[in-house]
Image (cartoon, rainbow, N blue to C red):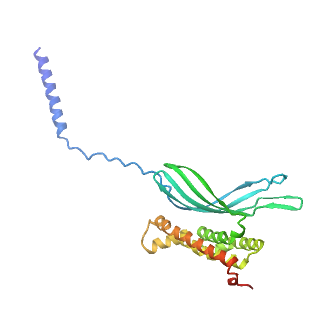
Amino acid sequence: MKKTIFGTAFAATLIASGAALAADIQRGPAPYYNPPSSLYNWGGVYAGLNLGYQWGKVTNTGVDPSGLLGGGQIGVNWQSGQFVYGAETDIQISGADDTFAPWKFANPWFGTLRGRAGVAFNNVLLYATLGLAFAGAGVFYPFFGTLLGWLGVALTGSDTSSNILFGNLQKITSEQLGLSPILMGAANSSGGVMGKMIDAQSIVVASTATNWFGHEGTILRFVFKHSIALACLVGVLVMLQAYVFTWMIVTP
């Protein structure tokens, strides 16, 4: 009986000593938890290229024009909470065509100018888009032809490259519409000058020259609205030269 009581008392003493030692152990720093990542941001300017295949059908005939399709697009989005809205323009060159007797059905190029509105769920965006296609721009072609040059330089970074890319298209389209090829060639170059301020090369040069590294997106968002506004002003001027101030056009 005495042995049992002694053993129990000794065990209790060890437990109490262990608890005292544990209380004296120095605690480490509190654990650090990374803050939750912010929601996906859909705002900003973007540009890209696309390639695909086009199918078509001419009503009441057996003609089904089809072929490769490719082009470029550029746009801008703004985000307020979950709501996203923006605008996009694109130009596409199409090889889709078909023949019916002596007639050939083709649409060698077309473009669109569209608005967008939607709701973002983190990195998923549900949106609707509505806009204007200018494949058959007609009398408004001088305006949209200028924007074509703007888009070419914005994507390639070079007025020369834009003229090589779209120069022949401007010439053929202007001749078919009864416009001056010289005017539309100049419009392609003039519109391109306004696109130079938003091409990737110019943005990188600007951030490097001002020692504002890592803020290329901020610079692009700031100058984009000025670029598109100036391109539209040049388009309006080309429209006036095409139909009102025709004496301004140089003739060979």
Which residue sits at x=15%, y=26%?
Answer: 12
Residue 213, position in %: x, y?
43, 68
Residue 125 lies left or right of residue 247; in this view the side is left
Residue 215, position in %: x, y?
44, 66
Which residue sits at x=76%, y=59%?
Answer: 96
Quarter residue 6 falls in: top left
Report the quarter where the C terminus lies.
Answer: bottom right
Q: Nearer the viewer, residue 138 or 223?
A: 138
- Quick one: which residue is furthest to the top in this view? 1
Residue 153, position in %: x, y?
61, 71
Q: Is residue 90 above or below residue 207?
A: above
Quarter residue 3 falls in: top left
Report the quarter where the N terminus lies.
Answer: top left
Residue 213 lies left or right of residue 188; in this view the side is left
- Quick one: which residue is furthest to the right in this view? 101
Which residue sits at x=57%, y=73%?
Answer: 194
Residue 187, position in %: x, y?
65, 76
Q: How many numbered marks does the figure carry?
A: 0
Residue 58 lies left or right of residue 210; in this view the side is right
Q: Nearer the viewer, residue 211 or 185?
A: 185
Q: Is residue 4 above or below residue 48?
A: above
Which residue sits at x=83%, y=54%?
Answer: 63
- Quick one: which residue is furthest to the front in this view? 244
